Amino acid sequence: MSDVKEYLEQAKFLDLRINAKLEQLNSLKDLKQIVDIPVVVEKIAALEAEIDRDIDDLVNLRQDITHLIRRMPKLEYRTVLELRYLSCWPWEKIALNMGFCKSHVRELNARALHECERILKSSAHFRTFQQFSAKTPSQNGTIPKELSDRM
């Protein structure tokens, strides 16, 4: 279950990472206007293409996580997962807004994570998720598109 939690926790930083990549793209575009050396311009263009691919991967990951959360069978599970992992709310704020005590919200989260794990394991592409979970946290960046197609 900790792999599923790590997978969902990536969502907390996706917007920040996407914005950082967009800033990198803007800087490179500014640099490309100043530099008039063909070899350097070519390298800048290659970096831009790489950053564009990174942005696509990050957006796809956010979409995959959102689709997984939408598959939750209970409204309370979806709400807790959305507030915790997509909106980055602390447990106290979630509990207050849902009208539950903090321990109940954490229990709902645990049940929701088990449900996420069940959904991922029932997927025809569970091997893909296993590859994700076998990586170190710094290597994790996305679940390949084949898995998101099943969500």
Image (spheres, rainbow, N blue to C red):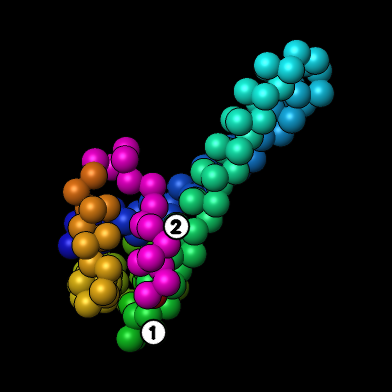
Q: Where is 124 relative to 136, above or below?
A: below
Residue occupying image coordinates x 37% and y 75%: 150
Task: Please tell me whether mark 1 sits on a helix, a strand or a loop.
Answer: helix
- In this rendering, does residue 86 appear at all? no
Q: For the residue marked with disc 2, what is the amino acid? A: Leu
User: What x and y, as percent, mark residue 18?
Assistant: 56, 45
User: What x and y, as percent, mark residue 9?
Assistant: 35, 54
The answer to whether residue 18 is left or right of residue 69 is right
The disc, 1 or 2, on the residue closer to the chain's N-terminal end is 2
Mark number, residue 75? 1
The answer to whether residue 103 is left or right of residue 25 is left
Rounded to the nearest angstrom, the CA distance separating label 1 from label 2 is 22 Å
The answer to whether residue 108 is left or right of residue 92 is left
The answer to whether residue 145 is left or right of residue 129 is right
Task: Please tell me whether mark 2 sits on a helix, a strand or a loop.
Answer: helix
Please name which of the two marks, 1 or 2, marks the residue nearer to the observer.
2
The quarter of the image holding the C terminus is: bottom left
Find the magenta span and give its range: 136-150
At label 1, counting other C-alpha atoms closer than 10 Å, the crowd grade (few under 14, some 14-19, many 20 or more) is few
- The residue wearing badge 2 is 61
Q: Where is 94 relative to 31, above or below?
A: below
